[in-house]
Amino acid sequence: MPRNGNTVNDWLLEGDPAIRWQVLRDVIGSADRTVERERQKIAREGWGARLLAKQDPEGTWAGGLSSDGGLYSPKWTSTTYTMLLLRDFGLPANNVQARKACTLLLDRGLERDGGVNYGIAGKPWGRSETCITGMVLSILTSFECDDDRLDTIADHLLTQQMPDGGWNCQRRFGATHASVHTTISVLEGLRHYEQHRRRKLQAVRAAQRRGREFLLVHRLFRSHRTGEIIKPIFTRFAFPPRWHYDILRALDYFQATAAPRDQRLAEAIEIVRKGQREDGRWSLQHAYKGKTYFELERLGAPSRWNTLRALRVLKWWDRAKPDPRNEKHVEAG
């Protein structure tokens, strides 16, 4: 089988509707009507339908299994993590079940400081958590929740940006350097807010540029001080990533924002290229332990999720215009 081409695309199109519509849009470039017709199948068949069938009558998932009413825990069957998956699947924004869950996540999670967190019995915790806030903002805006409280949440995230350009949920405990885990969740939340809410555009875009620069200074996975790899696991690709960071998740964010090509990404791009197997696919290289409703893909086996994401990242990289300001950056020390 060739390392890339129609055979890989055919294999991708044999997968779940959640995969197929994104392959048609991002890899093949099919007509919008064809893409949308495939996307509408997510709620009726495959992974999306199976997850929707697990929803409690109240609108949560795993509602009776945790002290917060299933809003954030248990991992990975709670409402937040199920909705993150449905977001990634591309479940249409007008889905009634998803909208019901969005209302619960917002009503029971918004804290006095403007962020989001989940306490006992779905009551406010008293103080928000930045990772959760970023994830929930991405969910609410992906499903086009029309509520001015989303602007409050976005404002809160803007105020939580650290001097180095990133975010860290441990900041209130004294952290002075941003976390890649928190940063990618917030960046995804702000991207969806920009795309679907279309408010505070100048401030939201500026915050994302600073956040991307934080990741670029680290070449996505290296210490900005020593150049050493921060954690080897950052170079192994998992799906779903849950709250965890890796370079494929980061690169997928860069391509989704149509960011200019920056040479500080070149090493991460090469890692993605080298991950391609002889048959043109990428494997599921890592999986996060925890209870799930069902297995999407088998660890070590060819992964449609990783293949889809890698192909669209490489397509963006090979076509993106370079940013002349960043073509000659020296190596981080």
Image (spheres, rainbow, N blue to C red):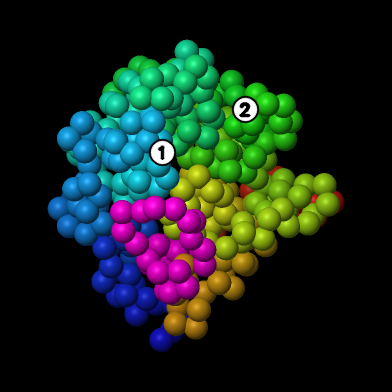
Provide residue 312's location: percent of width, then percent of height: 44, 60
Q: Residue at x 61, y 56 (%)?
A: 234
Instruction: Compare residues 157 and 286 and report the one nearer the observer.
Output: 286
Residue closest to the far top? 112
Provide residue 15's location: percent of width, then percent of height: 28, 67
Mark 1: amino acid: Ser
Provide residue 174's location: percent of width, then percent of height: 72, 26
What segment is highlighted magenta in the picture? 285-313
183 in the magenta segment: no
Quadrant placement of the N terminus = bottom left
Tell me: residue 188, above or below residue 85. Answer: above
Q: Would you say the residues marked 1 and 2 are in contact, meaning their CB atoms lie under 8 Å apart?
A: no
Instruction: Compare residues 225 and 311 and report the one nearer the observer.
Output: 225
Mark 2: amino acid: Gln
Circle number at residue 73: 1
295 in the magenta segment: yes
